[in-house]
Image (cartoon, grey):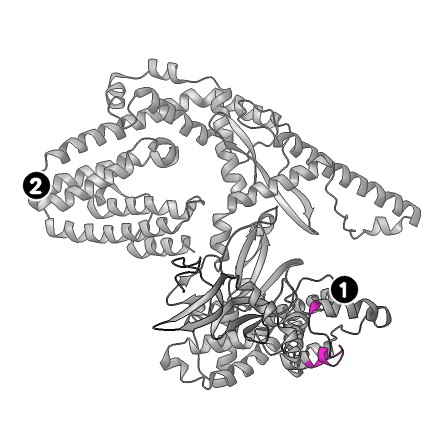
Amino acid sequence: MFPGSHLFKKNHDWVMASELVETSRLWARSVAKIDPAWVEELAPHLVKTSHSEPRWSSRQGAVVATEKVTLFGVPVIADRQVLYSKVDPEYSRELFIQRALVDGDWSTRHHFDRRNRARFAELDELENRTRRKDLRASDEELFNFFAARIPENIVSQRHFDSWWKNQRLATPELLDLTDVELMAQAAEELDIDAYPEHFDHDGLALELQYEFNPTRYTAESGTSPTAAADGVTVRVPVVFLNQLQPERFDWLIPGLRTELITALIRNMPKPVRKNFVPAPDVAGKARTALEQDFTPGVDSLTGSLAAVLRQLKGHVLDPEVFDTSALPEHLRFTFAVISERGRVLDSGFDLRELQVRFSGENRQAIGRSLAAEGDTDAPRQTPQPGRPGSAARSQPPAAQSAAGADARSQTSRGKQQQASASSAAAGKQQQTSWTFGDLPREITTVVSGRQITGYPALAPASSGVSYTIQDSAAEQSRVHRAGVVALLREVLPSPQRYVLDHLSNRERLAFSQSPHGTVESLVSDATTAALAHLVPAQLPFGEAEFEVIARSCRAELIETVLRLTDVLAQVLSLSTELGSRLERVSSAALKAARSDLTAQLQQLVYPGFVTATGQAQLQHMPRYLQAVRTRLDRLESGQNLTRDAQDMATVQELEDEYDAALEAVPAQLPVPAELAAVKWMIEEFRVNLFAQQLGTAQTVSVKRIRRAIKTSSR
């Protein structure tokens, strides 16, 4: 820059000189600063323009590109976004049709597009249901459909809206996709009925959701907690959860049944599988025979399949050879438990596990449904007509009609009374007296067209008892019995003072060393056990019935508790004696036996053992402890140590199997009575092994005990 210029030694990005003078150097003279934005307007013949990256913009509803303007190779504008339709209208039209009309990537309120999107969504759902991606017409076919119907000058949404504003008045359905244009040839051969929208479970229509998502599981990412389950999901309202039979779902849906049978055959051990190849061909024939000879959802799938394969190939199969747990995810139903508000509580493949885990929510939902029905004064059920007898047939039609109306009226009034009684009791929590009126044995109502039954019961609470609804008669009996005992504890005067005053010195000494900590807590435990023994098998469901039982228990309670204290004195005296002797055993040869005997004592005598054991079984406790003493005497004298070790190993194997069966019982469920009885079978077996002279209350053996464990664990 010429030294005489006023811009000399000033740095500007863009300047313009009116002349260049070359002496010893090249000088710019008459220099002025300029804005590069002026260049494009003032010297368009000098600039060069280029465009790159044409792309669809859903916000603008048009194809845009990046424009670059240069002057003598120097960028004037580096990256300006412009409409590409002025550069390449043909390409802009193609991209508009593909992205807006076919893909739906635009913001519009046109009715035809809303209808087309709905049809696309229906077809996507159908592809998910059928696990296919070839039902929709190709993008090229859809493109040609729209290209043939819109003018050549339509290159953006603005152009389209201007044209369609008038065109829709003449042909409003011009751009509506019909099944002919939308669906591929393969869709015509599809059996839609094989992929139902609902699963019928004894009249209960359960919604089915389909998801074709085979890549949900990957080696790198594992299971995504937000990914939808691949396959078919059964949406189960929590109120109906306890009514479902898991084996009904083994047959899956008709559309996947052949693939299911194929997978079951392929999962068989190789020595067996080789008799049923090729698996797809055998599966096709097996399915035809299965649906002819058996009823899906009623007969066992594995048992039926074993029978059919034996008929086809002549090889006998054990149904256990089919490993359903190894089936792919989409060949097993996923069960989603749905709350009353429509929220998914959880989902999984194991319906039984979900039924156990959400048993509490199921009971609460049934209770709320029944309470709501009670508030409306009547369960809305249509009475089922009965079969009139000869007397009814002999009546004239008018008399029969009147009699039928009267019977229906009585039935309705009875159900109204049931519902009203249940509704009145429903809010009663932590009651210390019978304030529940007369409880019905069961209550029925209709939810979503399905009849559900609840079983009212009183359950022990932190204070008194509370009204609850149980999901089965067996659970009602168990819970209600405990509730009646708890309520008797509240309404009857405590026998504790009288019992404590009449304890002998021997009993006081034994009681002072109980694991309960205090004599009072032990007597309280004995009182509860006595009441549980005195409550009859026929439980009270009304206040009058409860009062009768309360009077009977009051008359016999003190005597029953005193009889229990005599047995408890023997138990605790023996337990204390044996505990002291075991502490003094120091021989290394007796270390294993000492540990076994100590564990046995801890399983027999512990805080709360009186109620947990029950009065009937408590009568045998002294004999069990005497057997422990007999065994300890023999061990301390050094007799039959080898035989004792062998017998102890046998007992410990049985105890391990019993413990495993107990651990398999879900925490939400009570231990089955049959399984709980195994504990006493093992105690009787110990008596038979180590103190046979004392005798046993029942015949026991290793085989009998293992059979009892297996039977009660099913």
Q: Position of residue 435 (x, y in %)?
A: 60, 24
Q: Position of residue 261 (x, y in %)?
A: 51, 76
Amino acid tagged 2: Ser
Q: Disc 1 marks which residue? A: 111
Q: CA distance from mark 2 to mark 1?
A: 98 Å
The answer to if 313 sits in the magenta stretch is: no
- 693 relative to 206 in the view: left or right: left
Q: Quick one: label 2 or label 1, which is nearer the N terminus?
A: 1
Q: Position of residue 269 (x, y in %)?
A: 37, 77
In this picture, is 82 found above or below 611?
below
Amino acid tagged 1: His
Q: Disc 2 marks which residue? A: 637
For the magenta stretch, what is the residue range? 144-157
Residue at the image position 72 percent from the left and 42 percent from the top: 379
- 433 relative to 656 in the view: left or right: right
For the image shown, how many numbered marks are present on the structure? 2
In this picture, is 544 found above or below 266?
above
Residue at the image position 49 percent from the left and 22 percent from the top: 490
The answer to if 145 sits in the magenta stretch is: yes
- 440 relative to 645 in the view: left or right: right
Q: Is residue 296 visible?
A: no
- 38 relative to 451 in the view: left or right: left
Predominant SS of the magenta segment: loop
> The N terminus appears in which quarter of the rendering?
bottom left
Residue at the image position 33 percent from the left and 55 percent from the top: 706
> The C terminus appears in which quarter of the rendering?
bottom left
Q: State if disc 1 and disc 2 touch (CB < 8 Å).
A: no
Residues 701 and 519: in front is: 519
Disc 2 element: loop
Question: Circle 1: is it few (<14), some (14-19), or many (20+) Cα within 10 Å?
Answer: some
Q: Quadrant of residue 277?
A: bottom left
